[in-house]
Image (spheres, rainbow, N blue to C red):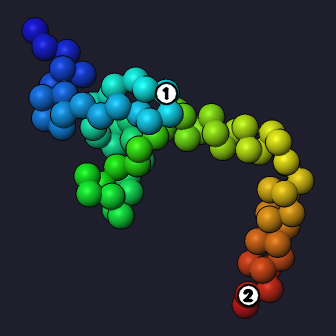
Amino acid sequence: MMSERDIDLMLFGSRRCTACGHPFPASSEHFHVDKSRADGLTSHCKACLCAAGRAAYGRDPGKYAEANRRYRKRKAARP
């Protein structure tokens, strides 16, 4: 019996994450959608993108706090 991963590989093909190098089924389960790319998927897997985002936040949380304050202020000013 074929696993769900095997079926995904048959239907969507395989795609290798350019950050970690692991092959995944080329589907939106493992890669974010990017309509500007020919195949419609990002080059980094979701796990790598999340890890990069957490690392960026960890390097400068004040930057994100300030952006959040500006966003809330802008939203509150709208009628």
Q: Earlier in the sequence, mark 2 or mark 1?
A: 1
Mark 1 surroundings within 10 Å by alpha-carbon count, few (fewer than 14), some (14 through 19), many (20 or more)? few
User: Residue 66 is drawn in which quadrant?
Assistant: bottom right
Report which quarter residue 77 is drawn in: bottom right
- Give the distance between the C-alpha atoms of the residues marked 2 and 1, in whole angstroms: 43 Å
Image quarter of the N terminus: top left
Residue drawn 34% across the image and 49% down it? 41
Which one is in front in this view, the residue at disc 2 or the one at disc 1?
1
Q: How many marks?
A: 2
Mark 2 lies on a secondary structure that is: loop
Q: In the image shown, does 44 or 79 lie closer to the viewer?
A: 44
Identify which amino acid the numbered label 1 is placed on.
Cys
- In the displayed structure, 25 sits above or below 70; it is above
x 33%, y 58%: residue: 37
- Mark 1 lies on a secondary structure that is loop
Vertical placement of residue 52 versus 5, above or below: below
Mark carried by residue 78: 2
